Amino acid sequence: MKAIINVGLVGYGFASKTFHAPLIQATDGLDLVAVSSSDAAKVQADVDVEVERQALALCQRSDIDLIVIPTPNNTHFSLAKAALMAGKHVVVDKPFTVTPSEAKQLKALAIDKERLVSVFHNRRWDSDFLTIKALLEAGTLGRVSGFESRFDRFRPEVRDRWREKATPGGGIWYDLGPHLLDQACELFGMPNAILLDLGVRRDDAKADDDFLALLEYDGCRVSLSAGTLIAESTPRFRINGTKGSYLKYGLDPQEDRLKAGEAPTPHWGNDTPGTLTLREGDGDDAPLVRREHATQAGNYHAYYQGVAASIRDKTPLPVDIDDALRSMVLLEAGLDSHRQRRWIPLKHHL
C-alpha cells in the first residue's frame, strides 16, 4: 500500500465538519482529497479540497482509497455498500447500520472485496473511559458489582434535524445508545440479556429522547441511560466493586474542543479528575478514604491513526467490524425488549 492514503468524505454536516475532517487532516498518512456536498462554498470555506455533488461520484474516483460516511443513519448501509462495490475501504459513523441484517451483509461484502470496514466508536478514546479501563485492568476496585453510565443533556427544544425524527435510525437510542453499549461491551463483553425502556419526554417530540437500558452480566448489573431534560449535573460514570467505588462527573472535553476549532495536541484530551473511594487497611472497621483520581488524557486522534495503520500495515482495526455488529444486535434487541416489556436473552443473537 502506498504511504499516503487518500480519503473521500461523504457529506459536510455536523459530524463531518466537527469530527471527521479535523481528525483526518491531523493524521499522518491520511490525505483528505475530496468531499461530496451540494454546497461547495460551505466545504471550501473550511478545507481546501475538491467537491463532488454526489456521493456515488466520490466513491467512483480512482484516486480515493478510503471513504468516510458520517451521514444520516438510514443511509449508512447503501453508501457503505456502494463504496465497497467500488473497491474502497470504509469508515462509517456509529451506528454501523440500522439493522443487524444490513451489518452482516456489509461484513460479507467487505470480506468478498478484501476491503476493511470500521465504525467510528470514538468514545472508546474518551478520557474517563480510558481511566476506567485502566482501573479495571489493575483490579483497583476489585470485582465490579455495578456499573452506571449516563449521557444526560438539557435540550428541551425539539430541533428540526434527522436525529430527532421518527424514522429508522432516528431517536436517542440510535444516537447515544451505540456509544454506551460499545463502552459497556468493551469492559464486560456481550451481556446475557437486555431490558430497555424508551421514552418521549419533551413537548412536541416525535422520536424517543430518553432511555434506560439494563444489561445483565454474571454478578454485575450495568445501567445505561440518556435524557434530554436533565438540567442538574449527574455522574457520567459510577462504578462499585468489592474494594471500593469510582465516580466521575462531566463529559470528556474533546467534542467541545473540536467544536471550538482546536486541533489535537499533546494536552488536547486533558480532563478533570474523578473520585476514588477505597478501604484503607484490612477488616470491616478499616476506614473508607475518598481521594481525587487523575483522569487519563482522551485521544480521538488514535482512531484514525489506527485506521491508517490497518490499511497500510495490516494491523488490527481500532474498531473491528464484529464489534460494530455486536452493537447492532444490542440496539435491535433493546427495541424488542421495549416493545415486549421484558428482558431479551442474547445468547443466540450473535
Image (spheres, grey):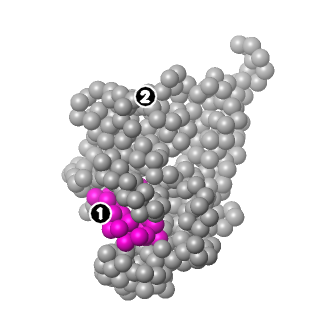
Kindly tell me whether residue 232 is visible in this rendering.
no
| Residue at x 62% of width, y 64% of height | 313
Q: How many marks?
A: 2
Answer left or right for 253 relative to 337. Answer: right
Region of the chain picked out in magenta, as a range: 66-94
The residue beneath circle 2 is 192
SS label for mark 1: helix
- Amino acid at the residue labelled 2: Asn
**Residue at the spot 60% in from the left edge and 71% down from the top edge:** 27
Reply yes or no: does residue 191 show up in magenta: no
Q: Amino acid at mark 1?
A: Ser
Q: Are marks 1 and 2 in contact (CB under 8 Å)?
A: no
Q: Is residue 347 visible?
A: yes
Q: Is residue 250 depicted above or below 55 in this figure?
A: above
Give percent across and percent down for residue 100: 33, 46
Find disc 1 in the rendering and name its residue.
Answer: 78
How far from the left and from the top, in percent, is residue 76?
Answer: 33, 61
**Residue 264: percent from the left, percent from the top?**
62, 67
Residue 93 within the magenta-colored segment of the rendering: yes
